[in-house]
Amino acid sequence: MLNIKSYLLSGFALLTAHLTLAQQPWQKVTLPKYNAMVATLKNYPTAYAETLTWGLEGPLSRESVIADLDAIYKQGIRVVSIEAGYGMKIPYLSDGWFENIKIVVEELKKRNMRLWIIDEGKYPSGFAGGKFSQERPDLRMQGLVVAKRINLKEGETLNEKLDASIISAVAVNAESKSQQIISIHNGTINWKAPVGNWQVLLAQHRFKTSVTRAANNPTGGKDTLNSLCDYLNAEATLQFLEFTHVQYKKHIGNEFGKTVLGFRGDEPEYNFTPWTPQIISIFKQKKGYDVTPYLASFFGTFMTDEQKKARADYWDVWSDLFRDNFFKLQADWCAQNGLEYMVHVNHEDKLMDLARSEGDFFKTMRYVQVPGVDAIWHQIWYDTVADFPKLASSAAHMYGRPRSLSESFAAYTPKPTVADARWVVNEQLVRGINMFEYMFWSSSASGRVPGKSYLTDAEFPALAEYSNRASYLLANGIPAAQVGLYCPTESMWLGKKEADSSLLNVAKQLLEHQIDFDFVDNQGLSSVFKLDKGAFTNLSGQQYRTIIIPQTEVLSAQAYRRLAQFAITGGKVIFLGENLPLVAGQTFKNSLAGLNFDWAIRESSAQLTDKVIKSMSPPDVVLSKALPAIKYLHRRWEDAELYFFFNEGEEAQSINALLNGAGKAEVWDADAGAIKSLASKIISGKTQVALNMAGRNSQFIIIRR
């Protein structure tokens, strides 16, 4: 059995050793000089290039690896993400698997290519190809479930000795739309039904897993045969690292930080209410009360306000554990070994669902080196509004990471052409994504003849070159958005759907008015951001001077105090919506109403009115006419300003743009790596240029100070 204490101590020693080593440029936020960017524009470092998911399916051999990599290289791809597939003669994570990975690394190195390792044999991350079910069943995932539903009429009594795993009970009355918590004493329930018809729900903790799709599963299906590990338990995560990452290190560790860039996680989540053996004691330490009596009420249809607040407290605690005991431990291990941890979770386009299954997006990404999203199916297309990629880029900006990921084009409907793919890429670039994982390339060893796709199209190499160079440009410099839009995850824990809809509505309006922003979260506002003279400074060195709070049910006391100080010292805090939020101290259950918000600006309509816009910090970009289809991104270099514009619409646009920063204007061509001058004039310390943009086209403008 893994000795956790010795593992942690050895990990600390490794971390201490690596702290003496400088990070690679692609692993840290930079403030480059103009001349340095000019020198690398044509030939950018390979580590910044996009990656391609390469499914290692079928009976792999050196010959099949060579054939695949030659074909992939021909299409302009310089980095691959390997995923274990079906039909392999040797099991995932066996000695034979790692021998094949050594061959892959050898062949990549010959071509000066790079590697990301998908950390699981299919998905979601965390079942180690089935090893938890087979070798460490004690560390399998656990959850809270309804063990029994017992119907009672008025006057009937339920008196029963319960299994030790049944810890909470609630009675639900559908007629009166009410529910009552029932006490359990010494493992026994004794309750007499009052007036009406009741259903008693008994809540039990037990081993339970979200479904997994495993390369080692002979059926190839999604099922519960191979259990995920207990994400909330540090011992389980350390065992996951031992099963996977440590084994890779034994075989290819000499290429860590060189050919091998890092590990990529995929959709760790809970499809049910999470549980871990220590959660009740941890909850008591954090919140100061026993949540056990409330647990069954989470499954009822008619929760009281008190029960909803207790649920929010529970979500707050388990999402902390998810952050610290799963994501952070993997990020720390990668940092100790010169690697990066890149991951996306699930439901980024549906924040209410994400709050249920992940707890808090920004907690999951707090320590991750490359935060990510997943763009699949039809999530980003010409007929959809899709601002969710800004979740990943905002996490990167807030927490001092240069890059953010989008796994793109899996199961896309309709199948994209190269032109479609370029539009989807630009749609995400302008929202801050600067690394793409293109889906999907199957190994030739599978015996399947590759079908026609955007990846195999003769025009794809040009897209690869463009997106590589664009991503390189957008991974350098300090993000410059001055507006933070608060993501009210805590309100979503309380079941407030309007928190989600209001957030997305405001995000859409901001971008349509060329007001760039980052989503900001409670962690940042409460403690992480430095607060000084009316500015919140994040870990990238970026300063927010306006914070917008969409319709929000509750704020933490720490965020409330710091927002007030921010406003009093010159920052702008804008509350949208009729009602001011509750303020929660140690618990949501005891949150307070009626606190003073006189220091804030209020807009009861919850819309981005002209009054609200005028009250904000001066914008970086002012167009000569209103054009919602024009979006932009701004990053700061030491002696220059980078602006990236994208015309989302089909119609060509010719307008003037007044840009923050005075200097000489240039157009940088991300397709060819060329630079040309752009006519401009200085107006009141800003630079005015003419934007002439074809439909669905993009443009980089550099203002050299």
Image (cartoon, rainbow, N blue to C red):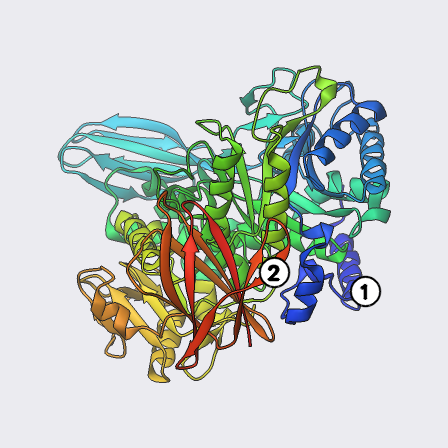
Residue type beneath disc 1: Ala
Tag 2 and tag 1, C-beta contact below 8 Å: no
Inter-mark Cα distance, 2 to 1: 42 Å
Q: Position of residue 88 (x, y in %)?
A: 74, 20
The crowd level at tag 2 (other Cα within 10 Å; few <14, some 14-19, many 20+) is: some
Q: State the residue at coordinates (25%, 26%).
A: 151
Q: State the residue at coordinates (47%, 64%).
A: 523
The crowd level at tag 1 (other Cα within 10 Å; few <14, some 14-19, many 20+) is: few
Q: Nearer the viewer, mark 2 or mark 1?
A: 2
Residue type beneath disc 2: Ile
Name the quadrant containing residue 454.
Answer: top right
Horizontal side of residue 291 vs 87, given as left or right: left
**Residue 137 visible within the image:** yes
Horizontal side of residue 145 vs 425, given as left or right: left
**Residue 587 visible within the image:** no
Q: Quarter holding the C terminus?
A: bottom right
Q: State the residue at coordinates (46%, 71%).
A: 680
Q: Which residue is identified by label 1?
A: 17
Q: Earlier in the sequence, mark 2 or mark 1?
A: 1
Horizontal side of residue 693 vs 48, given as left or right: left
Seen in the picture, residue 497 relative to 58 is either above or below; the reply is below
Q: Position of residue 172 (x, y in %)?
A: 24, 36
Q: Which mark is residue 675?
A: 2
Seen in the picture, residue 348 relative to 123 is either above or below; the reply is below
Q: Secondary structure at mark 2?
A: strand
Q: Secondary structure at mark 1?
A: helix
Q: Position of residue 357 (x, y in %)?
A: 45, 41
